[in-house]
Amino acid sequence: MNEINHKTVFVLDHTPYFGISCESPIDCDFIKSKLPIPPISKSLWTCAVEASVEYCRIAYDLFPAGKLIRFVVSDSAAHIVNTWNVSTQNLSHVMNAMVMVGVPPQQTQVTEYSVIHGLRAAIEALAEPTDLQREQLAAHAKSEGSKMVNRGRVICITSARDNGSMSNLADIFQTVLEQQNAIAAGHKEYIRIDQCHLVIINLYPANMESMVTSRPPVDISPILRSEIHSNKANKISNKLTHLILLHFDLASTTVTGIPMKEEQNASSSANYDVEIFHGRTAHSVFLGTELVLPHSAKPGVDYETVTLKWCTPRSCGSSEMQPCLAQCRVTPVDVTSRPSSCLINFLLGGRSVLLEMPKKSGGKITSHLLSAHGGEIFIHSLNTARSCLEDPPSISEGGGGRVTDYRIPDFGQLMTAHRLVPLKPLPSREPDEGLQKMRAKLRRNSRYWPLTFSRTVLYNVRQFVEPVLVLTQKPELTEEEKVVCIKSIYNLSQLEERQETLALPNMGHRLKGNKKEEQYRLLWWELELIVSSSGSSPAHKAIVSCIRECRRPSADDGHGGGGGGAGGATGSTDGGPAAGSEHRASVIRATTDSPMSPPHSMSTDTTTPLTTSASGAGAANSALAILGARGSKKLFNTGARSLFDTLATTERTISQKRIDFSGRLCTPTGQIAKLYPHFGTKDSDAGQGRGGAAAAAAAAAAATVDAK
């Protein structure tokens, strides 16, 4: 299906009302005279013609072919100014025809003047096929299943009393449009109008207030879209200038800082600004890069312009041509101004001008180029990234580019882990079952995969979390593998607590001053992202919860480690918050503490109740569980030691001197553990001699052990 949207019809109201003054006097510099000069103002008709012709000029400059514009003048009847023929699509033909039309007639009581005549003629003009449409109709007649979509736009410049009159005008237009489509169904000279855009501009003098309110675009029917703009006559040019940006997908650029010599004093120069129109592609190609489009609102208009700074001009030789992303034709907005004329003549003389644009990281960069080709001026969007004409970046030696720190060994491991082998087809196996599984695995394992070492923190210190990176690639983890991953995470947490600096290469703009906090923040973020993307099994979820628990909260993160929320979420899965925190405390002591470890300095809550159990180590673990569930943080180098700190240090030192008595672990709380539980039963028949003494000695030894 081909869509044709290259037809625009202007309907100009030529009724007697448009012969009145717009009440906006023109500033004229006359020689001082004793006779008073009355103010001079344009008529509504003159304002409408000038603005519509300027609209037409911009369209013809930017689109020498493909965009067709027709004019219809409506008074007592519809007067056709030009046709869809290319020979009538020029400003000379339009202006000569407007001269023949003349000023609006004076009002008489005999003839009925209305803009509806022009709207009917505009609908008939949209139903007439252009030369391009005739060619496509002939091509579609040979091929079945293809259809051409006829679209067009009608811009009606008129004047109405109130909103009701405007609504009636839109209703009449819709009725005539449906009638024309019915006629086109049985007529060979007309084609159906599949979509029409009606733009009504209500014009009134500058010293009056209009009863017509503007209305945004509204779909009246599936084939008709209408909008209303109410404007003063002296502002009609700005309104049509804004509309042409929307109708033809254009953008505005203001070139600032153009040095020009003064007309009165040739020895001095001043800087001027020139606004130009071009295709929006010249700006949209930079989206998503480090360039910043400096948008600014232009006073007196409804659109924004992009401000670019003039650079030193240079000749446009073949040796100085630069690779560009897009190029668009350029036309000045104010074609009669002296700065615009100087800029156009400068470019047509064979010179080219570079334009600067600011960067997000500071500074400026050359982003655009103005140059003339074949008598037409173009704006070129320069390629600010690595050019395809440069040598490709080096993989190993680094002789061809700046990027040399690719993760080549990791990429080799990735290819090895996802190697495909042919499988013998079996009736029980679905076709391409293995291929689909491998695609899912590759998609899961490559969801986050930095290309270079300078863009990652985790893979520069992977020796600390190697088990996590390797084991979490599996879809399912055993309990032993999960414990190994959790131990590695707690070891990494201990590194952060000891404030050890990570040995990282130059991270570029990724880190702010290579601070330790920023390094660890990115490290935890990458680790959580990789594990959460690797799988969704219960073991993976437990590891992610452990990472969030150990991860410190920051202003940039939505969650952090060490808090009660993360600990509660983990504890609820394993049997309550206390159980989860007690498990974490026991794992930390089992994997990180040693007889030579320094005592821990913790902040405690004075209102936290401590319960004493039969085992000193059990009491310490319970206290650690309570503190972990409440989200207490460790203090570094504060020197503050509470009663709990002293108790925990003493119990840890005692428990690490020797292996705990195994009989105590299987004896209920409050009872005395027996050293030889089966000794008395075997020797009961032997009497009370040696056996009784041994039993007494065993009881005494057990009591001594329990006392210790």
Image (spheres, rainbow, N blue to C red):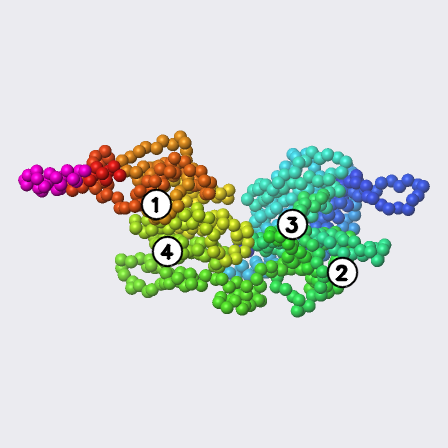
State the extent of the magenta-drawn residues as a range.
Answer: 678-700
Which is more toward the observer, 296 or 89?
A: 296
Mark 1 and mark 2: span between their CA atoms?
Answer: 81 Å
Asked whether the beta carbons under mark 3 and mark 2 sit within 8 Å of each other, the answer is: no
The residue wearing badge 3 is 294
Q: Earlier in the sequence, mark 3 or mark 2?
A: 3
Q: Earlier in the sequence, mark 1 or mark 4?
A: 4
Magenta-colored stretch includes residue 698 = yes
Mark 3 and mark 1: span between their CA atoms?
Answer: 57 Å
What is the three-letter code of the residue carrying label 2? Asn
Q: Earlier in the sequence, mark 4 or mark 3?
A: 3
SS at badge 1: helix
Q: Is residue 475 left or right of residue 82?
A: left
The residue wearing badge 1 is 589
Which is more toward the observer, 315 or 63?
A: 315
Mark in the foreground, 3 or 2: 3
SS at badge 3: loop
The residue wearing badge 2 is 345
Mark in the foreground, 1 or 2: 1
Mark in the foreground, 3 or 1: 1
Disc sitting over residue 470 in the figure: 4
SS at badge 4: helix
Q: Earlier in the sequence, mark 2 or mark 4?
A: 2
